[in-house]
Structures are given as C-alpha cells and as structure tokens.
Image (cartoon, grey):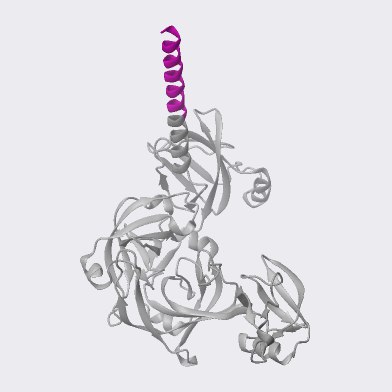
Amino acid sequence: MRRRKAFWKASLAVLLSAAGIGAAAGWLYHTWEKIPDSIRIKAGIEQELTLNAPVTGEIYLEKDRLEEALPALGTSAEPSAGLAAGSSAGLAAQAQVIPVNLSRPVTVTASHTQEYTMDVKLFGVIPFKRVSVQVIPDQSLIPAGVPIGIYVRTDGILVIGQGEFEGLGNVTREPARHLLQAGDYILQADGEKVESKAAFTRLVSEANGRELVLTIRRDGQVFDVKVRPEQDRDGAYKLGIWIRDNAQGVGTMTYLKSDASFGALGHGINDADTAALMEVESGSLYRTEIIAVKKGQDGTPGELTGVIDYNLENRIGTIEINSVEGIFGTLSREKADSIQTAAMPVGLKQDVHLGEAQILCSVDGQTAPQLYTVQIRAVHLNHDNVNRGIELQVTDERLIRQTGGIVQGMSGSPILQDGKLVGAVTHVFVHDSTRGYGIFVETMLEHGA
C-alpha cells in the first residue's frame, strides 16, 4: 500500500512539473510572438508602440552605426543619434541607452532615418530577444486596386520536369536523367545564350544526336553539364525534359508612388509546376478587362477571368523585380495619371489591429475599384511566411454575392484601415473563400520599388 501511494505521489509530481513546464513554455512562446523581429517607425513623427509584452528593453545605436552618424551630427551629438522614447505619459529620454517598458504603451520619435538595436530582457535581467528598430522615411502611397495583365520572361529556360520517352526500337530513353532537374535554368548551349523555348527546342533537334554543353543555374550556382539528345520513335531528337520560358496571368496592383513606380500582387510569381519563385529576366504589365468571375466555394478557390491583349499599344508598364513580397516596376505616365485614388499614409504593422478594415478591388470590369468591408481576425507580427501577416475575412455582402469572397486575381488588393494603407491581400483559405491572408505593406516597401 505504501509503495502504491508513493508511486501515485511521484506520478502526480511528475504530471504537475510537466504541466508547469508546458505552461511556462507556452507563455514564453506567446511573449516571443508578440515582439516583432524588426520594428519600423517613421522619421519625424511621434508614434506609440503598444505591444503589451511583459518585458523590458534597451534601445541603442550599434558602435559602427554610431561612428557613421557622429560626423554628420557633430561631436556634441548624443549617441542615440536623434531617437527619443518614453512612456505614454510623455516622459522622454535621449541617452546612450534608452530603456523602454514594453508592457505598456511607449511613445517613440526619431529625427532622421537610422537603424537601432533593441535588446529585450525578461524580468529586466534575462536576455530574451534582439530586435532591429528601423527608422524609415514617412511617405504616402496611392492605393490602386486596379486589375493588371502580367507577362514575364524567365532568366534562362526553366526546366519544369524530366522523364523518359519511347525511342527507336521501343527502347526507353532518358537522356537528361541525373543531369537536369526541375528548377534548373538553362542559360547557354555550347556557349551561346538560349533566347527562347522554341529556339532551344530547335537547337536540340538540329544537333542530330551531337553532345551539347549546357550552362545551367541551380540554386544560385552556375555550371556546365554535357548531355546527348536521343531519338524518339519518330526519329526526332529530344532530351526528355519539359521546359518553360514565360508566365502570364491576372492580378491586382497594390500601390503607386508619385514617380509612377508600383507594387503589386503581394507575393511573387511562382512556377505552376515546380512552385518555385520564377527568376525573371524581363516583364510587362498590360491592360486587362475582367469579363467573368468564377465564385469561390468551400474546397475550390474562385477566379477572376480577364482578357489580355499582348499588343504593344496595350502595354502599360514594366516589371523589374519578382520577389517573395510581390512584383515591382514602373507604370507608364498615362496609366499612372488615370488612377485617381487619393494618396494615403503608410500604416506600419504595429498599427494594424483586429476589427473592421476595407479592401480596394475591381471585380466586374465595368466600374472603378470599389471599397469592400472586411474584418481583420488576426495579426501575426512574426509569421514565418511573410505573405501571411494579416488574417482577414470578407463581410461585405456585395463582394460575397459577386465572388464568394476572395478569389484568384484579387492578389494585391490594398488593405486599408483607419485611413492608412496597411497591406495587400495574398491568399484565400481553400476551405472558406470568405477568409484569407495579407502581407504588411511595409514588407512590400522593404523589398520592392
């Protein structure tokens, strides 16, 4: 009996200890998620940070940045180089190290663009997290919300797959096996630049079985491989690969700057077969007209169907960057002047909060972009997928009747809250077409035009 009681007491102690450890781990994780890896604030504007995290921090300028800042500021400048922070009561300090208590609102001001470091500590003692504090220029952007036709050419010929084919004498052939793989970019053949899919196919055919030296790029590394085309059952020479040299589609422009540079989509253009971000050599925007809407249903995303005429006179801009955060480039002056939406201040991610917001988009092809009501359901300051920082749900019955919620082609639709441009729609939930994700516009601005 005593042994049994001792056993149960020991088991209970272990369970209680495990529960305590689990609760502590959960609290630490929740606290970690509430503190962004980077915080941006606007130069020349007093801003309030409300993170409600039970930690303290110290903001300072790294030594190498301080040495760069001092000559411009004069030898009498404080090492904080123009940053001040204080409590919501208005207290402020400008010293070598600025202490902040993140459990309550903190008012921050900065006189000019600069990057600081904030060391966050638990209980004011235990090192917990290092945060980059970036002071960025204050700017306003024009929310666009207009549909765009997209055409890009890959930087090289993209290999989307390799396999076998039936050769002469009913023998299976796999010339490219173990040599080329999905995601490779073919840059040159025998030292000559490969201009297009058609040109490469013709070159392989005309080689008549002669060994080719292909220069390929794989995961950023460039090297040569030797491969010999072989004949299929009809006598045509092949390598046994599927290739692509372009991509096209419909999306939505997010914002426009005064110099006619734009950001769109809120995510990159990925290859449909490999799912990898396409490495783009050049690209263009074209006028497009939305002619139909396939409504989203549970389990099946909807889609905007647009007509794109790829004639030169319909070209309205150039695409210069294809990144995880979106596509970026320059719009024609004529098209830029036709977008009449008023410019709005940029909302930083700490400004985004749960509750009502709007998205700006055009889904019927007949009217200018319209505002539709949504609810922001969650804000993920540190999501490991930058395209999913904002979680939202369409509540506007007009948009639900037209599209079922969020559909393909709406990617890039600006998200507006409290009179600020805060993000762009990026994804739809497959199981619920009224719900989706968005990217913070500050993230787009960091990596785009």
Residue 87 is left or right of residue 175, and the answer is: left
Q: Residue furthest top?
A: 2
Depth check: give the residue in front, 432 or 94.
432
| Residue 152 can be seen, yes or no | no
Q: Residue at x 49, y 56 (%)?
A: 385
Residue 55 higher or lower than 304, as above or below? above
- The quarter holding residue 398 reads bottom left
Residue 15 higher or lower than 204, as above or below? above
Depth check: give the residue in front, 152 or 419.
152
- The quarter holding residue 197 reads bottom right
Q: Position of residue 339 (x, y in %)?
A: 37, 78
Residue 225 is left or right of residue 333, and the answer is: right
Residue 345 higher or lower than 331, as above or below? above
Q: Position of residue 280 (x, y in %)?
A: 59, 75
Main SS of the magenta segment? helix
325 falls in the magenta region: no
Q: Position of residue 133 (x, y in %)?
A: 53, 47
Residue 54 higher or lower than 240, as above or below? above
Q: How many marks?
A: 0
| Residue 388 can be seen, yes or no | yes
Residue 18 is left or right of residue 435, and the answer is: right
Depth check: give the residue in front, 328 or 426.
426
Q: Position of residue 138 (x, y in %)?
A: 46, 59
Q: Residue at x 33, y 57 (%)?
A: 392
Q: Residue at x 52, y 47 (%)?
A: 37
Depth check: give the residue in front, 157 or 49.
157
Q: Which residues make up the magenta segment?
A: 1-21
The quarter in which the N terminus is drawn is top left
17 falls in the magenta region: yes
- The quarter holding residue 16 reads top left
